[in-house]
Image (cartoon, rainbow, N blue to C red):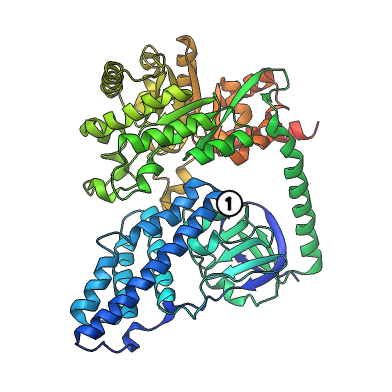
């Protein structure tokens, strides 16, 4: 008989086998605020309580500063921004000052005031209409727990040092817990709650820990010390497996680890096909630190700098100097390799409270990305001035997201031209020949690729949005998830049209959506003539190994066969058959 199978959401791939470490944090967050008496209505009592709250805030800030510094070393600047964002909450007028106000005006003791404000703010996030913002409520509760613990210093906060290899089992992990995990000891984790965009998931991937979130009440059956198998790719945890079942997974785990070790050699090699063609493989990044890491992992450049992370980790709109420093540092870290900076892609599932964007019934079809930039041109001009200035420090290119027609492209290009003229008049140094291109995410842009190709310097296909707009299926809606497929024939024909139009005009086409990092799609994209792939840096070495076994002639023939097919299922079958034939040689 096999062990107990617990299904969750796989968010960080890998197979690991180890004993369970059931984590039940003892934190002041568990204190029932209603059980704490009100403080005396006396100035001295109020001031004493406020003094305790301020001391706790100072301790909390110090802890977060220390953790942020550690996180930058362990997982990079973007992920460290999770904790830096919590630190900024302590200065937010809608957060900490409200706690002091409750102590002063309602005579609430500090723990009750903290709990009340945290509960209110977290509930506001939980009521938002997209998953990313809902999951930010966990960050609010995390800093609330830290503040409460700092009010009761005798109570430990976070994970104690763990000896040996374990798989962590928890209801959830706060970002400040996850960033402290040592991947040498915590080799896997499974949580009751959480989603694919939760910070637990993001940090687990950065640390290389096999992880499953959202496993529900199934984790209640796991006992401390139980043998566990975690398959982060399949989202499956097996508790107390029988020896035969454990041995099967142990074999797969060892094969996976051996495969990863063998791929490390590809990081220092260029991507070359079996017939000797050089292929450009770039990385998607969100910070200068990730640019540096991408170089170490063998990237030919950065095919997408997601600048929105710079905005989302700030309490107010970053100015030109702050943006310039971030872009210039990324350019320097790439050491001459191309850096494609996408202008602010806010809207849809990415909100900026300080921009006060209107609430919309269909945000993915509404006021987002370049539409915001063109409506509020002072924002776009500031960003473009920073990008242009950064071009003096490397091979910088700029691209505009969510372009639906030539008029939008021309308006955006005009703002870029104005920014360049301003800087030229100011005597600033920059690359006068800096390339400018567009993201192809809307079917209208793909259909009009021939006309665009006369004016833009390059295309970058964003398959994540292109698919959802082509098949009219929200990529975050589980009820229509089965329709969302980048192997849909309509999507493939749009991709071919873009690539052929760019080549006819002597231009090039890249791809920075998730399709670019899918090994199953690689021979098809090679056959279609894609010039540049941009993906998460961890996928670069596996993709180089795959491309080394592919012949362009065979892939072109494969692409022609696939373009004659009429369903995504048929496309997948053809690609699976091609992969099986290659592996069987």
Pick the residue in front: 418 or 319: 319
Label 1 Cα neighbours within 10 Å, binned few <14 / some 14-19 / many ≥20: some
Q: Is residue 260 left or right of residue 353?
A: right
Q: Is residue 231 left or right of residue 346?
A: right
Residue 225 position (above or below residue 78): below
Residue ID at (65%, 33%): 543
Q: Quadrant of the C terminus?
A: top right
300 lies above or below 486: above
The quarter holding residue 30 reads: bottom left
Report the number of discs. 1
Where residue 566 appears, as percent x and y from the top left, is: 52, 31
Residue toward you, 181 or 437: 181
User: Does 341 sit left or right of 296 as displayed?
Assistant: left
Residue 519: name its quadrant: top right
Question: Residue at 32% of width from left, 36% of height from top?
Answer: 369
Question: In the rendered view, does 280 fall on the left or right side of 430?
Answer: right
Residue located 35% across and 53% down the image: 130
Closer to the camera in the image, 320 or 141: 320
Residue sitting at x 78%, y 52%: 254
Q: Could you say where residue 83 lies in the image, as x and y percent from the top left?
A: 44, 57
Which x, y percent locates residue 482?
48, 47
For residue 83, say whether it is visible: yes
Q: Residue furthest front?
A: 44
- Where is 332 relative to 221, above or below? above
Position of the N terminus by quadrant: bottom right
| Vertical comparison of 488 with 314: above or below | above
Label 1: state its secondary structure. Answer: helix
Q: Which residue is mark 1?
A: 74
Along the line of sight, which residue is nearer the eye, 289 or 437?
A: 289
Residue 570 appears in the figure? no
């Amino acid at each position: 008989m096999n062990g107990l199978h617990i299904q969750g959401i796989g968010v960080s791939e890998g197979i690991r086998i180890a004993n369970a470490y059931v984590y039940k944090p003892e934190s002041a967050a568990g204190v029932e605020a209603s059980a704490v008496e009100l403080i005396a209505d006396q100035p001295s009592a109020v001031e004493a309580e406020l003094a305790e709250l301020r001391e706790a805030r100072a301790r909390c800030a110090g802890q977060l500063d220390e953790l942020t510094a550690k996180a930058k070393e362990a997982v990079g600047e973007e992920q460290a921004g999770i904790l830096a964002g919590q630190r900024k909450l302590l200065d937010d007028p809608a957060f900490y000052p409200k706690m002091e106000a409750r102590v002063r005006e309602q005579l609430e003791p500090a723990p009750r005031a903290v709990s009340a404000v945290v509960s209110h703010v977290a509930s506001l996030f939980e009521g938002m209409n997209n998953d990313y913002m809902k999951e930010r409520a966990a960050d609010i509760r995390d800093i609330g727990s830290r503040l409460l613990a700092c009010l009761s210093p005798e109570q430990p906060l976070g994970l104690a040092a763990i000896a040996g290899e374990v798989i962590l089992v928890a209801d959830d992990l706060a970002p400040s817990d996850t960033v402290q995990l040592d991947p040498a000891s915590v080799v896997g984790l499974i949580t009751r709650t959480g989603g694919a965009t939760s910070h637990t998931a993001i940090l687990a991937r950065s640390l290389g820990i096999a992880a499953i979130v959202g496993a529900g009440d199934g984790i209640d059956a796991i006992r401390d010390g139980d043998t566990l198998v975690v398959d982060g790719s399949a989202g499956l945890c097996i508790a107390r497996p029988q020896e035969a079942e454990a041995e099967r997974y142990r074999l797969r785990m060892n094969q996976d680890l051996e495969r990863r070790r063998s791929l490390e050699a590809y990081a220092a090699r260029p991507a070359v096909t079996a017939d000797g063609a050089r292929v450009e493989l770039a990385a998607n990044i969100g910070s200068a630190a990730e640019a540096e890491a991408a170089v170490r992992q063998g990237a030919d450049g950065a095919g997408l700098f997601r600048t929105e992370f710079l905005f989302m980790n700030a309490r107010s709109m970053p100015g030109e100097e702050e943006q310039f420093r971030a872009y210039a540092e990324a350019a320097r870290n790439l050491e001459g390799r191309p850096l494609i900076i996408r202008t602010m892609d806010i809207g849809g599932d990415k909100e900026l409270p300080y921009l006060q964007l209107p609430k919309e019934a269909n945000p993915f079809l509404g006021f987002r990305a370049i539409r915001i930039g063109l409506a509020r041109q002072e924002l776009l001009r500031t960003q473009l001035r920073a990008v242009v200035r950064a071009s003096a420090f490397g091979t910088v290119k700029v691209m505009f997201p969510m372009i639906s027609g030539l008029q939008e492209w021309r308006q955006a290009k005009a703002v870029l031209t104005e920014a360049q003229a301003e800087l030229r008049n100011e005597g600033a140094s920059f690359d006068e020949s800096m390339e400018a291109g567009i993201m192809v995410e809307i079917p209208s842009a793909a259909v009009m690729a021939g006309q665009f190709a006369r004016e833009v310097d390059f295309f970058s296909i964003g398959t994540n949005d292109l698919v959802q707009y082509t098949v009219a299926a929200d990529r975050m809606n589980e009820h229509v998830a089965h329709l969302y497929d980048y192997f849909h024939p309509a999507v493939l024909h749009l991709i071919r049209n873009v690539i052929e139009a760019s080549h006819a005009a002597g231009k090039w086409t890249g791809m920075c959506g998730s399709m670019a990092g899918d090994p199953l799609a690689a021979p098809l994209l090679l056959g279609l003539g894609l010039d540049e792939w941009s993906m998460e840096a961890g996928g670069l070495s596996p993709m180089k190994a795959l491309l080394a076994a592919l012949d362009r002639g065979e892939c072109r023939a494969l692409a022609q066969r696939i373009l004659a097919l009429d369903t995504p299922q048929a496309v997948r079958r053809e690609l699976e058959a091609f992969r099986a034939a290659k592996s069987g040689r």
